[in-house]
Image (cartoon, rainbow, N blue to C red):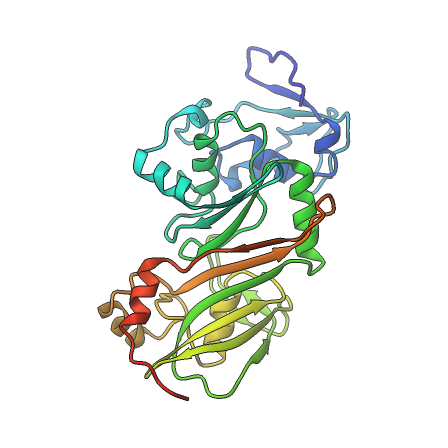
Amino acid sequence: MKVPATARSGVALVRIEAGQAGQRLDNFLMGRLKGVPRSHVYRLLRKGEVRVNKGRVKADYRLSEGDQVRIPPVRRSGVSADDRAQPLPEGLARTLRGAILLEDDDLLVMNKPAGLAVHGGSGVRLGLIEAMRRLRPDAAFLELAHRLDRETSGCLVLAKRRGALLAFQEALKSGGVEKHYLTLVAGVWRGGPRRVSESLARKGPGTRVRPVTVDETGRHAESFFFPRRHFSDSTLMGVEIGTGRTHQIRVHAAHAGFPVAGDSQYGDFEFNRRMKRLGLKRQFLHAESLRFHLPDHAHPYRIQAPLLAELEAVLERLEPLDV
C-alpha cells in the first residue's frame, strides 16, 4: 500500500495495490481506521468525506488495483495512532501466547479465551485482534478470518496474508469449513442426533446488539446436535453448524427446548442459577474444532481446542445419568 505525503489537514491518500483489490470499501476502512467506531466510519461514507478516485462511492464499493482512496483525519476515540506499538499487560500477553494452537505463514489459530471480544467497539476498547496486533507489532497483515461471541471460547482463525483471508472466507461461504462445538444444555436429551433447521433474524429497535429469533423470513440456518454425555438435569452436546449465523447455536438450542447453560439472553434462568452454584461463570459454549482446506496447501487443516479447565470442572460436579 503506497501512501503519498499527506497535507497538513491530515488527509491520507492511499493507493490500492493488487493484494487489496476486490475488498469492500467499508471493510478496508475498518482495517485502516483501528479504534474508530463502525458507526463513525459509515457516517464518513454517507457524508462523502471518504472518496475513491475523487468521487463519492457507497460502502459496498469493491476496490480495484490503482484506486486512490481519500481518508480524512479521524479521532480514534482516545486511541493514539501508535496504539499498536503499546505493550500489552503482561497477564493478557501471557494468556494470548499460551492460547496459540497453530501458526504458519498464512494463519494463526487461537483457543480464544471466554470474556474477550474478538474486536473492539461498542464500549470495548481492546479486543483480541487489537491485542494480537500489539503482541505482533511487526506483522504486516493480521486480520480476523471469522468471529466468535464474546463469551464463547475455542478455535478462532486469524489470517496473516490477505490471500489466506480471502481463501478461508470463500471456504466458509461454500461450506468447506467443518465447525464443531461443545455445549452443555439444560434438560436430558432423549434420542440420538437431531437437526435443527430454522431461519434466524434479528428483532427489535436500535443498531446495538439485538436478540435473534426463529423467523421464517430470516436467513437460513442449520445446526446438528449430537448428545455426548447425559447428566441428571443436563446434557453435554456436540454441535456441528452448517451455517454461521449470529447466536445460531444458542437460539437453535433454546428453540429445541434445551437452552445453553449460562446463557443470560436465551437461557433458562433457574437452571443458570444452579449451574452458577456449581462454578459456571459464563455460557458453556466452546468452539472445539475446525477442519478446512486452503488451495495452496497439500493437506487440510485439522485444529482442535481443548476444553478449558473451568468447564471441565463444572462437568465433574454434575451427576452422571445412564440413558
Q: Residue furthest left?
A: 277
- Residue 180 picture location, percent across and down: 54, 64
Spot occupied by residue 228 in the image (x, y as percentages of width and height): 46, 76
Q: Please state the horizontal and vertical placement of residue 251, each as a whole percent of the image.
A: 49, 70
Q: Is residue 80 left or right of residue 303?
A: left
**Image-quadrant location for residue 158:** top right
- Left or right of 48 in this view: 91: left
- The count of marks equals 0
- Residue 59 in sight: no
Give the vertical position of 117 relative to 268 (above or below).
above
Q: Nearer the viewer, residue 144 or 314?
A: 314
Quadrant in which the C terminus is drawn: bottom left
Corner quadrant of residue 21:
top right
Point out the image quarter for the N terminus: top right
Residue at 37%, 58% (x, y): give it: 308
Q: Is residue 319 left or right of residue 228?
A: left
As drawn, which residue projects farthest toward the right? 65
Residue closest to the far front: 298
Which quarter of the figure has residue 240? bottom right
Looking at the image, which residue is at 61% across and 57% down?
291
Image: 245 above or below 46: below
In the image, taking residue 16 as reference, residue 216 lies left or right, namely left
State whether residue 285 appears in this view: yes
Q: 261 or 220, which is in the foreground?
A: 261
Q: Residue at image x 55%, y 10%?
A: 8
Above or below, 294 against 163 in this view is: below
Give x and y (percent) for residue 298: 72, 48
Residue at the image point whose x is 25% and y is 65% from the top: 279
